[in-house]
């Protein structure tokens, strides 16, 4: 991965460069204290990730992001912020920034955020290759229909990307489940009957590996539970920032019990005496399947 760092604080630039180097995250190909005059350099070199301070002299981070999009920048942005301004965060979300690093800079947070962005980019590139490969198959009407059914993976990836969990450990498990239900006559009825999730987990795992142990099933469910919980956390955070955000409005009630989402929002807002929000895996998988099939049509 190639990085460009935009931050008027020299110490912050040095810390970020050192973390990227020492954590083997890639190479810093450039840095600057001011966005003025470097936009052309960034778009010419097309780094994979630009780490950009939200508050810089002459031109702030969001304005710089807008200018770089106009110049056809292809990479990702990670915003560096030392303030908790909800309006600015909401504006950043609208401009396509989905990842934040907070000041003072923390090695663990920097490494975690960058790795999530790297994983998302990896999945997006895989998706692009899948689309490219499928394009060569679209010669007849029958092949086009077949290609449509093969798109279940890519559509599920898009949805999980919207929920901010594409890089989570259980995202690939969820995609396998949705694909298995879609192509299995036995489990299509999962949507209307009370079939056991454990049975589905078992068959999906068996489709991937020859033998399935109780330990495998437990680990599989835990990965999914952690991932779905992270999706709720992401939506709740979005709701706290911007209650009218399109992603929050579209997904919060469809994928979760909204009362539980509100509990999570109160929990994130550090309200005392609030019980932990609960997730319903069946509802989430059901909603993910319906969302995927609706986009196939």
Image: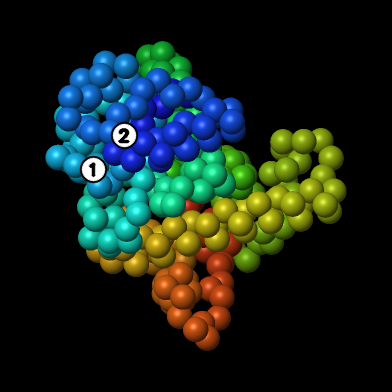
Residue 265 image-quadrant placement? bottom left
Any part of residue 144 in sight:
no
- Mark 1 residue crowding within 10 angstroms, few (<14) / some (14–19) / many (20+): some
Q: Is residue 267 left or right of residue 223?
A: left
Q: Quadrant of the C terminus?
A: top left
Residue linked to disc 1? 56
**Residue 150 position within the rendered picture, expressed as x and y whole percent measured from the top left:** 49, 31
Give the residue at the far left of this rendering: 58
Residue 58 image-quadrant placement? top left
Asked which secondary structure carries label 1, the reply is loop
Asked which secondary structure carries label 2, the reply is strand
**Residue 35 position within the rendered picture, expressed as x and y whole percent measured from the top left:** 22, 32
Residue drawn at (56%, 67%) of the image: 280
Give me the C-alpha separation between circle 2 and circle 1: 9 Å
Please determine whether, in this image, residue 27 is positioned above or below residue 217: above
- Label located before the other in sequence (2 or 1): 2
Mark 2 vs 1: CB contact within 8 A: yes
Residue linked to disc 2? 6
- Mark 2 residue crowding within 10 angstroms, few (<14) / some (14–19) / many (20+): many
Q: Nearer the viewer, residue 288 or 107?
A: 107
**Residue 201 position within the rendered picture, expressed as x and y whole percent measured from the top left:** 70, 51
């Amino acid at each position: 991965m190639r990085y460009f760092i935009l931050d008027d604080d020299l110490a912050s630039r040095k810390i970020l460069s050192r973390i990227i180097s020492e954590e083997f995250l890639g190479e810093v190909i450039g840095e600057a204290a001011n966005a003025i005059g470097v936009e052309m350099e960034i778009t010419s070199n097309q780094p994979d990730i630009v780490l950009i301070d939200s508050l810089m002299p002459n031109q702030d981070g969001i304005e710089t992001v807008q200018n770089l999009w106009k110049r056809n920048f292809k990479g990702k942005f990670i915003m560096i912020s030392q303030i908790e301004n909800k309006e600015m965060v909401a504006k950043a979300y609208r401009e396509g920034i989905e990842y934040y690093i907070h000041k003072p800079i923390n090695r663990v947070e920097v490494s975690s955020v960058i790795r999530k962005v790297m994983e998302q980019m990896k999945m997006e590139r895989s998706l692009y290759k899948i689309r490219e490969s499928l394009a060569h198959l679209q010669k007849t009407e029958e092949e086009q229909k077949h290609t449509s059914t093969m798109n279940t993976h890519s559509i599920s990836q898009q949805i999980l990307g919207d929920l901010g969990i594409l890089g989570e450990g259980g995202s690939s498990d969820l995609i396998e489940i949705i694909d298995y239900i879609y192509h299995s006559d036995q489990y299509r009825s999962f949507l209307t009957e009370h079939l056991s999730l454990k049975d589905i987990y078992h068959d999906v795992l068996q489709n991937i590996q020859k033998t399935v142990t109780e330990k495998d099933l437990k680990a599989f469910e835990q990965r999914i539970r952690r991932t779905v919980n992270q999706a709720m956390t992401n939506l709740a955070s979005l709701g706290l920032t911007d209650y009218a955000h399109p992603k929050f409005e579209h997904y919060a009630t469809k994928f979760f019990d909204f009362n539980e989402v509100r509990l999570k929002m109160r929990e994130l807002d550090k309200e005392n005496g609030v019980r932990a929000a609960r997730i319903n895996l069946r509802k989430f998988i059901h909603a993910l399947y319906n969302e995927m099939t609706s986009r196939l049509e």
